[in-house]
Each structure stands twice: as structure tokens, then as C-alpha cells.
Image (cartoon, grey):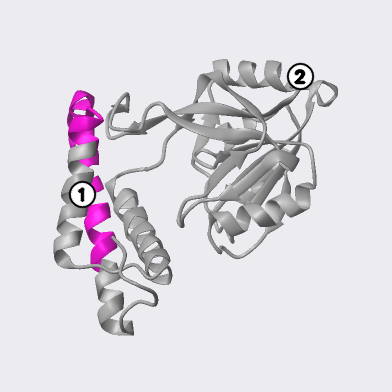
Amino acid sequence: MPAEARLPVTGLVLTFNGERWLPRTLSSLDFCRRLIVVDSGSTDRTLAIAEAHGAEILTRDWEGTISQFRYAFGHIGAGWVVTLDQDEWLSPELKASLIAALSAPGEAAGYWCSRRSYYFDRYLAHSGWYPDRLLRAFRLDAVSLGGTPPHEEFGTKGETRLLSGDIVHHPYAGFFEHVAKLNSYTQTAAEALYGRGRRASLTKALIRGMGKFFKQYVLKQGFRDGRAGLILAVHGFFYAFEKYVRLLEMEETRGKSPGHDQP
């Protein structure tokens, strides 16, 4: 998009070795007058791709998404922000919706976007993964940043609405990458639980895992996503199970967690 046609909006992406989809991510944000990439030490072509798209590159060691976003917001200062993960991009319909909304936002403080994720052999339509509505466009002076590691959560104090179209999401290159992320996420989540004084047991780990599978595969109709839905629900079981097993291990190796016993 010609520079003179771009909107006074900042496109923001956190990166680490994201060369696989980053060109599509940044191209879908070409309506933003400013692009910022906060990189955590990429060794692939991520930085070259960011430079080619005219992005400002900020380098910072990884301390979790919440910390990274706080750092990025400090460099943006004010105005509207649209943020995507390095494995996401805007569908043509959502991009058009965003451009129309941000051209005349009025009193709006933020916009929700649905996210459609590709897993195994299809884009998921159920399993609790769609519609996965996320606040990804917001006025910086109206946004709040929270969540539980490893995931951030944006909130806003003002008026919001849902836009048409989807964020397209390709989270895993294959099962190896999914298992590697599961391993990392469960450790981070267990650390957060331990720090809040939560307690664990093998029985609790099993119950949490089975509950996660039942919710994802039955209540959220993961069975309607075919083989992908079943595989994802099994991974959901292992995520919940492993998170509480890791918490139990921390109690055994570090001593009982600080604070009182919580459900």
C-alpha cells in the first residue's frame, strides 16, 4: 500500500525465528503507517524479512509475552495498535473490515477479531478453537494487559465491537513443534501456579486432563473436526495432565508451594 494511503496505526509483531509465515503477517499489516517487530534473538531470516517490509526492529531477550508487550507499548506511546503473532495474518475480509473501522473509529476503544486455526489437515471449526475471539486492535490509552503465563490477555475500558473476517493462524509446522511448545507452555504455566501457591496431586492431574479432553472433544464438539479434533483433544489432555504433574514435581523438589491449598 502506498505510504500516503496508510492509516495512523502501529502494527506490532513479537518474533523469534518466524521466517515461515512472517512475510504474510507483515504484508497483511501494510495499511499501518508504522510497523514494529520485537525480536528475541532470531537466527533465521526473520530480521531480514522485517527490514524488507520497513519494520522498526527492537531486540529484547524473551521474558514472556506479557513482558514483551509492555516493553513494546512503551516504545509506541499512544494511538491505535493492531497486533498479530508471527504465524498469523489478516484474511482479506478482516483486513478490509479493519481499514474501514480504523479510518473512522469514533468513540471505539477496540475491535474483536475471530481467529481460524489450521491443525493437522484442516481449519478447525469447533474444538473450542473457533471462533477464537481476540482483542487485537485497540487504542493504547484504553487497553489493559494481563493474563496468565504463557498467554497474554488484552482488555479495554471503552466501546468495542466484533469485525467480520478472520485472523488466519498456522500455529504448528507439525507434531514435533506442537509437542515442543506444549513442553514449554506447561513448564511456564506450572511455574505460574507454583508462584501463586497452588497445590497438585496425581489424582488432580488426571482429573484435569480428562476434564480438558471431555470439554474439548465433547462439549466443544471437537468430534466434528474429524481426526484433527481427536488429536487436538488428546494433546489437550496431555497439556493439562503435564502441567499439574510438573507442579507436583516442583513441590517435591523445591518444597511445598508458598501460600495455602487452593482448588
Q: Which mark is residue 263?
A: none
Say which amino acid is labelled 1: Phe
Residue 84 among magenta residues:
no
Q: Which residue is drawn at the image coordinates 22% and 38% (left, top)? A: 215
Residue 8 lies left or right of residue 131; in this view the side is right
For the N terminus, the image quarter is top right
User: Around disc 2, counting alpha carbons within 10 Å, would you say few (fewer than 14), some (14 to 19), or many (20 or more)?
Assistant: few
Which secondary structure dominates the residues rendered in magenta? helix
In the picture shown, does residue 195 fall above or below 151?
A: below
Residue at the spot of label 1 = 237
Residue 2 lies in quadrant: top right
Q: Nearer the viewer, residue 129 or 251?
A: 251
Residue at the spot of label 2 = 103
Write the start and end of the magenta stretch as one range.
216-245
In the picture shown, does residue 262 fall above or below 230?
A: below
Residue 208 at what x, y percent from top left?
A: 21, 53
Of callouts 2 and 1, which one flags the residue occurring earlier in the amino acid sequence? 2
Residue 255 lies in quadrant: bottom left
